[in-house]
Image: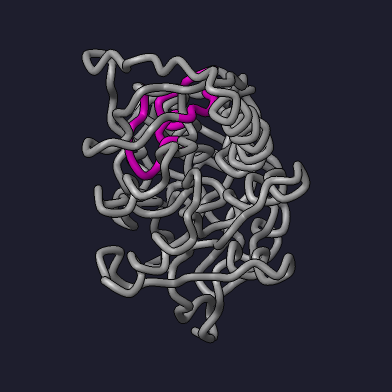
Amino acid sequence: MGTPEFAIPSLDILIKSGHHVGAVVTAPDKPRGRGQEVTPTPVKLAALMHGIPVLQPDNLRDGDFLSHLISLQSDLIVVVAFRILPREVFTIPRLGSFNLHASLLPRYRGAAPINWAIINGETETGVTTFFLEEKVDAGGIILQARLPILPEDDAGAIHDRLARLGAGTVLESVQLIELGKVMPVAQDHALASPAPKIFKEDCRIRWELPSERVRNFVRGLSPLPSAWTVYRGKVVKIFRVSVAAGATPRRPGEILLAGDSLLVATGDGAVAVEELQLEGRKRMRIEEFLRGYHPRSGEELG
């Protein structure tokens, strides 16, 4: 069970390892992209390439869907970036159901663990497989694998590395379950931290924050859902900034031009904007923006 690109390496590794995937469950087709064409999910496309039956229920408690799941007589359900499963679903397989989560649980429970780990300045993350139970992201841990977050990493880079790391962890978890060698470890709920879903308004840059926090905020949301600010009345997405050493604190959000650099004042100095995208335009390096839009010192981002 899965929907986005993140889940495809896990599906592929199970197929290549010789396990029989009786069906793939994914979200219904829906309008996507600028043209709003009705498009299948990435996981559906991957399943169809392998000739695997695809189920796309609107309601996970639908009687026909549940009957179909029962008829598969599956040993195990593997969940990677899907929805919260009701008890009626995750208790169907004889060996249970487990989920791959993109954090070192119990840290960063929720929908956006990769983004929040980087936003909060973490230097390490990882993946966790755990058995499903009623409480979300709280079941017994099967396996964990760790991954460093490097200073230059953004959410996109960590997403791709965790998808690959997660696939190997999924396969190893399945093999342990097959052999009856799993010893689930209970999570310490006192150590839990949230990673809630991120909405557009959450992504607006607060220039009054210290420079390092602004930098982590931007890279934690890059490339998606992307940090943004307002310039000359229009939304500007910002994908990469660096901390400007030795900058004198000024009014947060104020533009400071320095040669071929565009600095923006923060709560304790400034950051240099390196990549951005204006409303209705393509993503561009700062040099291209400076040539085309001629920003002035003293203008503000907000």
Query: Which of the pair 278/94 is nearer the observer?
Result: 94
The residue lying at 59 percent from left, 70 percent from top is 53
The residue lying at 28 percent from left, 21 percent from top is 192
**20 to 57, vertically: above or below:** above
Query: Which of the pair 228/43 is nearer the observer?
Result: 43
Rendering coords of residue 75 (x, y %): 50, 44
Residue 253, quarter of the rendered image: top left
Q: Is residue 295 magenta?
A: no
Report the colour scheme.
one colour
Asked whether, in this view, residue 155 is left or right of residue 120, the answer is: right
Residue 104, quarter of the rendered image: top left
Rendering coords of residue 154 (x, y %): 59, 37
**179 to 90, vertically: above or below:** above
Asked whether, in this view, residue 96 is left or right of residue 272, the answer is: left
Residue 268 seen in render: no
Rendering coords of residue 117 (x, y %): 44, 28
Residue 210, quarter of the rendered image: top left
Q: Which residues are magenta?
A: 107-129
Q: Is residue 118 magenta?
A: yes
Residue 284 seen in render: yes
Number of numbered discs on residues:
0
The residue lying at 42 percent from left, 41 percent from top is 94
Query: Which of the pair 301/133 is nearer the observer?
Result: 133
The residue lying at 34 percent from left, 37 percent from top is 132
